[in-house]
Amino acid sequence: MSGKQQLSTLMRVVVVCGLASLFAGCASMSAEECRTANWREQGMRDGQNGQPRSYLEAHREACGKVGVVPNASQYEAGRAIGIKHYCTPANGLNEGRQGHSYRNACPPELEPAFLDRYKAGYRVYQAQKRVDSLVSEQRNKQYQLDKAKDDNARDSLRRQLRDLDYSLRSARDVLSYEESRLR
């Protein structure tokens, strides 16, 4: 087989394996996990991970392909325990600060306290992202300035850097304010 043919064959194998991995990654559970599942424990894990009640449907679909039907009552009993560990104010703050999306998973009695801290954490996350974006833009402008030869371009870049300095100071003030609100 020539080098081109070997490369072509290798590329096909990589594409097929990649597609297989992609499709396998879409299922909520593997065939083996479906066959050996303890549905109470699975529900507890899903609850602790903040999966909404509707996530059971994803398991039904994945496991139905191998002839396994989830035990809904065991799953719900486990999820009810797990979701209490997820829907705490401390975890809400953590989830928000990490920029995770909230999937409407908390029961009504736990949701207000969770969401209050989640929103506070998410404001800090957004403020930090703004600071990071401005710092990146500032580095880029400084790099352009260092490389610029034309005086007009250099003057323009200096003005842009001054504007970015002002925006960055303001963004850091917002970040500081949002962090202080967490205390």
Image (cartoon, helix red, strand yellow):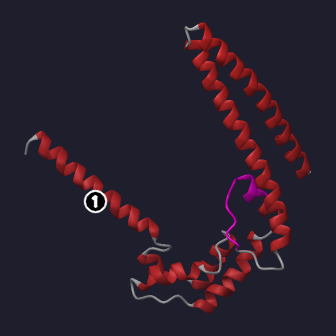
Mark 1 surroundings within 10 Å by alpha-carbon count, few (fewer than 14), some (14 through 19), many (20 or more): few
Of all residues, the one furthest to the front in this rendering is 152
Q: Amino acid at mark 1?
A: Val
Q: Quadrant of residue 174?
A: top right
> In percent of the image, x 24 and y 49: which residue is there?
11
Q: Confirm whether residue 37 shows in the render.
A: no
Q: Which residue is mark 1?
A: 16
Q: Which residues are magenta?
A: 93-104
> In percent of the image, x 70 and y 43: which residue is there?
129
For residue 108, above or below residue 131: below
Q: Is residue 45 left or right of residue 14?
A: right
For residue 26, above or below residue 99: below
Q: Position of residue 168 (x, y in %)?
A: 77, 31
Q: Is residue 15 left or right of residue 92?
A: left
| Front residue of this view, candidates 38 and 83 | 83
Q: Position of residue 115 (x, y in %)?
A: 80, 66
Q: Position of residue 62 (x, y in %)?
A: 45, 79
Q: Is residue 110 left or right of residue 45?
A: right
Q: Quadrant of residue 66?
A: bottom left
